[in-house]
Image: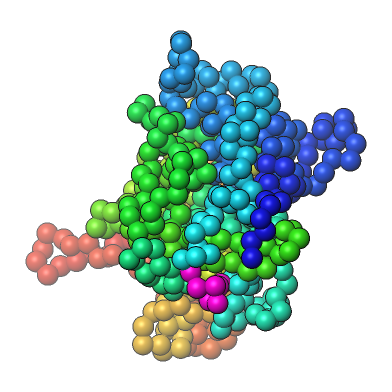
Amino acid sequence: MLPEIPLYNLFDEPSFPVRWLPAAVAEHVDLPDTVGLRDLLVRSHEIAQVTIAIPPALSALYRVLYALTARVTRLDEADDQSSARPEPWARRRRKIVQQGRLDPEAVEMYMDNYRDRFFLFGGQRPWLQDPRLAAECDPANTAGVNKLIVNRPSGNNHAWFRHVSPNTPDLPEAAEAVLHLLVWHYYGPSGRCSTRTSGTTAAANALAGSLRSTLSYHPEGESLFETLLAGLPEPGERVRRGSDLCPWEWEKLPDPAGAPPGVEGLCSGLTARSQHALLLVPDAAGLRVEDAFITWAWRPKISRAGDPYLIWQTSKEGNAYPRQADSHRALWRDLDALLLKKPTGTALPQRPAVFRTAPEVSEYLRVRALGFEQDGQAKDVQFVDASTPPVLDLVEEADASVALDIGRLRVLGERYGARLELAAKKAWTQYTDAPKIRDCTWAVDAAARYWPAAEAEFWKRLERRDFDGAAAAFRALAESAYDDVTLKALGTLRGAKACAQARTELYGGPAKTKPTAKAGGGARGTTEDK
């Protein structure tokens, strides 16, 4: 049973690990390794980073912190309607940057208003949970804590790193459970879940979370304070805080069988897109979670359109979709899509909206990419976490020339990576007499050699602003990788012939035959290194 008295409030309880700035360490003795939401905001100017080791949990927490920051700074509206003399949003944010910290009184005022909504257990409205699940779901068919903790095996899934028992599971501490509660809300799978009966609606399947399988891009500064302000995109002119609500701000819980609350602006867009409903069951002490209800929140799909931290692309059918998380793809390959207003690419990528205004906070912002490589349903592959050096001073609006050079540099790196892959596959196909070109060990080995070297070449040239001769440099890396993976096959005539013929793909493929004026005639073209 749920405890009658709420014990664990996220404003106060140390739930989130942090790394403090050196100046804070020098000034204070025995700084805590973990803090609650209050200190994350009030002391954000003293915190370097939130050090959560689960990338999708950090991505989700950032969105919650952005919403809280927008509220306490009143940057949740383009023109603050509560002010007698409204100032432009950018000017108001610039003043807060100059103040160097968030206003502690504003933080306390907000927390006083919603303190009862941030208890993790018990109460009328446990944080980001639906207490109605205790009655609307079968208590004998709960999900269990192994299902709640996303990096544990559950059910019939394989145990890669540890064995767990559904009968005697290790009970997660409340702080750990909070992180996985966030992952479920943003990255939860579609498909089978616990049966929930709400009124006349009974169902046992849920839709995928709004961020499932995606990669989020977040501007990060030298302190958490800069990170939070840089992460705020400017709200639309019609957004009003009275209707743009976070789930913990709802006056009452909506009917799950009806239409979900609309996404009205920044705060609701960041926090109110979940397709899953959860309820954590604490142990007797209220310090650990011993069980969990996990089921559907709404029957209709909530659109994820407009998320300001995703790279949006366009399918051949003309539909917008976010760039997927890929644990094999290095972050430098996305850099031009973060800096340019109209980056190149057949998918017509659009940079995350947050990067239009983020550089106004600081010229020393880096990019943090956080995500989860997954399929739409139950398959989870790998967490994705990558970071760049400070690069947001190179956005096209600030330095168009360098931003365009970065785009061309990325294109060249991608070009020779693609040519290398095709060359390796063709060589393998001809050498083994395979019926068709397909994935093979040579292509995998060549990629493992080329892409780390290409990444190093990219960052070296960007640091030196040296963009001349980049094509030759990437081509040399592709040649080296190709030669290494095909070396052993050169000892046979069959292998040498296959490797020599496929090698032309490194230079754009076999020479094309150009038609002449004479009928039936032809002239031998040359291989063009485009």
In which quadrant is the C terminus drawn? bottom left
Identify the residue at horizontal 64%, vertical 19% (top origin).
Answer: 98
| Count of numbered circles in the view | 0
Q: How far across and down, in percent of the image, does residue 43 sit? A: 73, 33
Residue 139: within the magenta?
Answer: yes
Q: Is residue 445 above or below residue 518?
A: below
Q: Is residue 140 left or right of residue 244?
A: right
The reply to whether residue 462 is visible in this rendering is no
- What segment carries the magenta color? 137-143
Q: Is residue 34 above or below residue 325?
A: above
Q: Is residue 1 above or below residue 359?
A: below
Identify the residue at horizontal 49%, vertical 22% (top origin).
Answer: 90
Identify the residue at horizontal 68%, vertical 46% (top origin).
Answer: 9
The main secondary structure of the magenta stretch is: loop
In which quadrant is the N terminus drawn? bottom right
**Residue situated in front as seen by the camera: 529 or 124:** 124
Q: How far across and down, in percent of the image, does residue 122 sit? A: 63, 54
